[in-house]
């Protein structure tokens, strides 16, 4: 039994933002795979829920005329994984989607919920960071767009203002066109697990050199993060195993790993160094570069 | 022997009920106006309740009763149904003061052989995080949860002893006042003169090994409901492996006579030993008594079940082995420290049983075993599939591998040199090995995994991914004889059409025992499977007495009773046929629903005709039934081996199992498909034990860190490789149809085989499980591999 005091559902975004404006205590619920667990664990009591499940317009996934990929916040992980456009254009996101939970969870959990839950371990986060995703937020009075890196404020804390709803995730053409990428979820299990480390990389390759590299890490700090120092270093460098090794080392500098019962700081940093290189090796090939041996 | 049904892959008798969702489990049953009970668990691992105030909880609308350690005795006087409780609890008994043991062992008339009685229904002294301090009965689960938060408890917090070292330390506080140094028991055994054996040996080699606390994780959590019926008896329906023992222990916990309790066991969603214990039923009964006998359901959440039921004992071993250059072992000395947690439960039986089953595999001139079982402020350890053997065989099968490596002996040959042979009489139990296929198991496994070719191939490796092969052997037992009573009861009733009802005390908990019992009856009576109706529900009012499902005893021990009961029915059928035909019964047999001439198979009468006669003959009518008990004072020793191939990712510390084969000598296999299923389940459990599973606790406070299925790394199907199962079928002369046990054995040897494969791949010996990536990383760092 769940401790639910009230339940509302909206059929359009404007209906939802209006309800939210009237009652700021409403807790948004999308797939419910995080919210209900919090209620089960007693962290959320006497909840008044506002469900977004009936807002079908938010499930839409498409590419705008200018090439911007638009993913509705209510798209489930199954929808994302099975979407041919995403599979073709940004496979690091579809791979992240299939790595999440189990089939039942993927059928109901949404990408918007995953992002707004604010967890560093969110399976979509490292890929969205590497892809420079932008988030469209809407409230009763209008909307704004924020880069995902500015959205994550701390563990479980996101820059969603009272009254706001995340409606869309946007990935601009300059951020994915011509890139090759790779996502590695390192977890203790092959399914139904939380990542020990999530590594998403994208790179652009030009005549044996890195033109651009972006590295997104999950669970390497209190929020998902980018490895800017390593990315800066990589720019224009010849793609060799030495370059990759140096990128791996620099990636550790951006990580803010800590020791917990789940894994030690030393091990996490070792994984950042190793898996960044492994992911890049494959990303280079996916970007049309030669295999690094 | 040629059989018709034994040895065939017949479909499970409960398959349709289970896949269509028609099988009803405890939670599917309901009484009218059922209330809900919930438990207040201690947040401290070691603490004394100084004061407890339940007034706010009691005042919450919907709360029907609040029970605490001191409120239990008032139950008798608080009842709203006068007369009932007085009749149940005699005035001399103070329920709150009653202590009882919870282990699902048969009762023993010998007081020295009984389990330690160290538990109250609710306790004033918390001994682990999760201990039961108080309880609430309310009209729904939400109200009950809210009421728990309103109970105000003041604790005096004591030092939490979260390891056996801390508990054994000089001056450590006592968890139970009557157990000095927190030692529950320390008896072991000695065969021969161990010092003499070491002196005679070319080498004396030592090793230390350690296993972790893990949990059963059966699909269905502990759940029960209880009420007092119009006959003033306590009725409990519960998800248990041991209905007759639950009845006894509930009665003992309440101080009432055993006949005043009735226990019903419907379909059960797995137990693995965690339901060979009485965890929630006494409190559930007390909850019902607290509300005047109204029905109350008590169901644990997964988070509760993972800390407040039972776990597998963690062990630390020190082993010393005296061995000659040729690989012949002269003597083995094993000392062990077993962590039993806050209460005894199965306690020292685990250490004893592991040490007992180990004695059959490698008989030596001298064998000495010194185990101690220690209380700590951690969750209670109890029975879990393998019952002490996964621990001791992990230690010894790792140790013998280390010896082989050190002495440059072949790991297979060193084992073969020391293996038991048919005819061996184990000196302490006096059990005699009547069949032994361990060598054939080894040969088969070796071939299946292509041991020789791959071991040669993997000799020199230096890359980031390295492969290796390992193996490990085990011995087990079929039931507990001679340690405990092995009584089984069976009743068969033949219907007018020649079909039968089969009633058993042995419980189906998912392992398939109902099906193999039906096969046995079908075989003896010459009727098809669909004519054997197994009554899967046990009801202590109706079901013949049998202590339940544990110790891999069903097919062997309860199977004896099934065969006996079926043979009695057969004799009666033939006697009626004789009366009808004047053909001597000894010339007759049963085949395909007919009475036939032995040998020729020529049909004499249809079985249905004989059955009708037995019901309606105007002079001799007496329906054909049998109702037997069998006391198995014998044991058959099963053997087996695991062969595993792994690939180790040196940089990340991940170990992947590429191939794994379990080959078993479990005598005649009654149903190969079900047997294979047992092996798959047991091996997957052992893979988690080897690589990923461990219940973790804060060292200082004893608080559980991962008592949920996200953080506790039970392998998923994606983590489970294809598991190869094979059998070497040597019929044991003592078992029904030549069977030996198979339930627990598959889970014994995979962990050391995987560990030995990792050793083969990397040269690094892991003496502690699980070998999870963090630990592997640390060890590779330590040994300079990365």
Image (spheres, coloured by chain):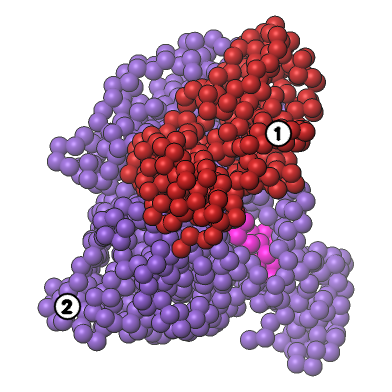
Chain colours: A red, B purple
Let me know if residue B315 appears in the view.
Answer: no
The part of the image, by quadrant, that contains residue B483 is: bottom left
Circle 2 chain: B
Q: Which residue is mark 1?
A: A68
Let me know if residue B47 appears in the view.
Answer: yes
Element at badge 1? loop
Q: Nearer the viewer, residue B700 or A240?
A: A240
Q: Which residue is mark 2?
A: B203
**Range covered by the magenta-colored residues:** B501-519
Relative to B304, B700 lies left or right: left
Relative to B652, B549 lies left or right: right
Using the image, tell me which numbered label, if any, was put on residue B91: none
Residue A165, given in percent of the width and then of the height, sits at 67, 19
Q: Nearer the viewer, residue B111 or B762?
A: B762
Residue A234 drawn above or below residue B137: below
Q: Nearer the viewer, residue A256 or A6?
A: A256
Q: Residue at x 59, y 18 (%)?
A: A160
Residue B445 drawn above or below residue A280: below
Element at badge 2? strand
Q: In the image, which is nearer the foreground, mark 1 or mark 2?
A: 1
Residue B684, given in percent of the width and then of the height, sits at 52, 60
Relative to A19, B592 lies left or right: right
Where is the C terminus of chain B found, in terms of image quarters?
A: bottom left
Residue B763, given in percent of the width and then of the height, sits at 31, 68
Residue B152 drawn above or below residue B465: above
Residue B325 drawn above or below residue B540: below
Circle 1 chain: A
Where is the N terminus of chain B found, in terms of image quarters?
A: bottom right
Q: Residue furthest front?
A: A207
Local crowd size for mark 2, using a 10 Å CA cut-off: few (<14), some (14–19), many (≥20): some
Local crowd size for mark 1, using a 10 Å CA cut-off: few (<14), some (14–19), many (≥20): some
Q: Is residue A246 magenta?
A: no
């Amino acid at each position: 039994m769940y401790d639910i005091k009230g339940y509302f559902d909206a059929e359009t975004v404007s209906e939802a933002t209006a309800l939210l404006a009237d009652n700021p205590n409403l807790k948004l619920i999308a797939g419910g795979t995080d919210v209900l667990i919090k209620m089960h664990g007693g962290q959320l009591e006497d909840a008044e829920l506002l469900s977004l499940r009936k807002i079908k317009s938010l499930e839409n996934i498409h590419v705008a005329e200018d090439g911007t990929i638009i993913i509705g916040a209510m798209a489930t992980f199954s929808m994302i994984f099975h979407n041919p456009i995403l599979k073709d254009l940004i496979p690091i996101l579809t791979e992240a989607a299939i790595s999440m939970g189990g089939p039942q969870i993927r059928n109901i959990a949404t990408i918007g919920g995953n992002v707004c839950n604010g967890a560093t371990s969110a399976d979509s986060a490292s890929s969205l960071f590497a892809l420079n995703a932008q988030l469209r937020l809407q409230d009763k009075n209008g909307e704004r767009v924020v880069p995902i890196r500015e959205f994550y404020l701390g563990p479980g804390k996101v820059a969603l203002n009272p009254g706001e709803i995340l409606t869309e995730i946007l990935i601009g053409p300059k951020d994915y066109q011509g890139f090759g990428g790779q996502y590695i979820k390192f977890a203790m299990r092959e399914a139904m697990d939380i990542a020990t480390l999530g590594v998403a990389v994208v790179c652009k390759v030009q005549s044996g050199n890195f033109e651009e590299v972006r590295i997104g890490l999950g669970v390497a700090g209190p929020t998902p993060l980018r490895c800017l120092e390593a990315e800066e270093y990589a720019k224009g460098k010849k793609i060799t195993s030495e370059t990759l090794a140096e990128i791996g080392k620099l990636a550790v500098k951006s990580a803010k790993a800590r020791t917990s019962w789940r894994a030690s700081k030393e091990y996490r940093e070792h994984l950042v160094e190793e898996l960044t290189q492994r992911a890049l090796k494959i990303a280079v090939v996916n970007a049309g570069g030669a295999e690094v041996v | 022997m040629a059989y018709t049904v034994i040895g065939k892959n017949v479909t499970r008798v409960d398959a349709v009920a289970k896949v269509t969702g028609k099988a009803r489990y405890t939670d599917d049953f309901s009484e009218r106006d059922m209330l809900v009970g919930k438990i207040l668990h201690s947040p401290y691992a070691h603490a004394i309740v100084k004061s407890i105030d339940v007034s706010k909880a009691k005042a919450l609308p919907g709360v029907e009763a609040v029970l605490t350690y001191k409120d239990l005795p008032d139950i008798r006087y608080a009842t709203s149904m006068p007369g009932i409780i007085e009749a149940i609890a005699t005035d001399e008994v103070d329920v709150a003061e009653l202590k009882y043991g919870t282990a699902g062992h048969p009762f023993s008339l010998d007081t020295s052989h009984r389990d330690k009685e160290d538990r109250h229904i609710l306790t004033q002294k918390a001994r682990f995080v999760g201990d039961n301090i108080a309880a609430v009965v309310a009209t729904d689960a939400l109200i009950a949860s809210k009421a728990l938060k309103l109970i105000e408890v003041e604790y005096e917090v004591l030092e939490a002893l979260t390891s056996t070292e801390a508990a054994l330390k000089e001056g450590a506080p006592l968890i139970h006042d009557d157990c000095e140094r927190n030692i529950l028991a320390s008896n072991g055994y000695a065969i021969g003169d161990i010092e003499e054996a070491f002196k005679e040996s070319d080498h004396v080699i030592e090793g230390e090994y350690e296993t972790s606390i893990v949990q059963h994780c059966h699909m269905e959590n502990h759940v029960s409901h209880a009420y007092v019926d119009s006959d003033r008896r306590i009725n409990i329906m519960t998800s248990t492996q041991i209905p007759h023992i639950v009845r006894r222990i509930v009665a003992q916990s309440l101080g009432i006579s055993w006949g005043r309790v009735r226990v019903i066991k419907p379909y059960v969603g797995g137990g693995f030993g965690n339901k060979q214990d009485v965890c929630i039923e006494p409190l559930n009964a007390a909850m019902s008594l607290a509300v005047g006998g109204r029905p109350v359901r008590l169901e644990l959440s997964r988070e509760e079940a993972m800390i407040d039921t039972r776990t597998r004992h963690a062990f630390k071993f020190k082993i010393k082995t005296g061995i000659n250059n040729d690989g012949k072992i002269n003597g083995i000395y094993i000392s062990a420290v077993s962590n039993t947690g806050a209460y005894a439960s199965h306690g020292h039986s685990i250490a004893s049983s592991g040490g007992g089953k180990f004695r059959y595999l490698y008989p030596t001139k001298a064998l000495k075993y010194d185990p101690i079982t220690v209380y700590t402020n951690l969750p209670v350890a109890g029975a879990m599939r393998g019952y002490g053997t996964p621990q001791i065989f992990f230690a010894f099968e790792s140790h013998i591998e280390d010896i082989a490596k050190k002495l440059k002996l072949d790991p297979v040959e060193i084992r073969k040199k020391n293996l038991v042979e048919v005819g061996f009489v184990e000196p302490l139990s006096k059990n005699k090995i009547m069949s032994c296929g361990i060598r054939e198991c080894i040969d088969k496994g070796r071939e299946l995994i292509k041991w020789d070719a791959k071991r040669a191939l993997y000799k020199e490796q230096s890359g980031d991914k390295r492969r290796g092969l390992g193996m490990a052997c085990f011995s087990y037992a079929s039931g507990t004889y001679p340690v405990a009573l092995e009584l089984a009861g069976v009743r068969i009733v033949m219907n007018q059409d020649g079909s039968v009802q089969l009633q058993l005390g042995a419980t189906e908990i998912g392992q398939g025992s109902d099906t193999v019992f039906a096969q046995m009856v079908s075989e003896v009576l010459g009727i098809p499977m669909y004519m054997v109706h197994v009554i899967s529900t046990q009801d202590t009012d109706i079901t013949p007495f049998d202590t339940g499902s544990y110790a891999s005893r069903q097919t062997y021990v309860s199977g004896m009773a099934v065969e006996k009961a079926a043979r009695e029915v057969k004799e009666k059928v033939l006697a009626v046929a004789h009366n009808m035909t004047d053909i001597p019964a000894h010339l007759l047999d049963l085949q395909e629903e007919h009475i036939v001439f032995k040998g020729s198979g020529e049909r004499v009468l249809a079985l249905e005709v004989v059955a009708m006669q037995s019901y309606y003959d105007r002079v001799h009518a007496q329906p054909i039934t049998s109702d037997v008990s069998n006391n198995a004072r014998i044991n058959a020793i099963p053997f087996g081996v695991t062969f595993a191939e792994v690939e180790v990712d040196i940089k990340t510390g991940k170990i992947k199992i590429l191939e794994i084969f379990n080959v078993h000598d479990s005598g005649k296999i009654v149903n190969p498909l079900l047997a294979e299923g047992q092996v798959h389940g047991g091996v997957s459990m052992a893979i988690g034990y080897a690589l990923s599973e461990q219940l973790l606790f804060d060292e200082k406070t004893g608080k559980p860190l991962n008592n949920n299925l996200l953080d506790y790394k039970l392998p998923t199907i994606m983590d489970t490789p294809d598991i190869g199962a094979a059998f070497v079928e040597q019929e044991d002369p003592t078992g029904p149809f030549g069977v030996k046990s198979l339930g627990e054995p598959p889970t014994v040897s995979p962990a050391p085989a995987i560990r030995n494969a990792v050793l083969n791949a990397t040269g690094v010996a892991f003496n502690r499980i699980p070998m999870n990536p963090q630990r592997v990383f640390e060890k590779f760092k330590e040994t300079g591999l990365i």
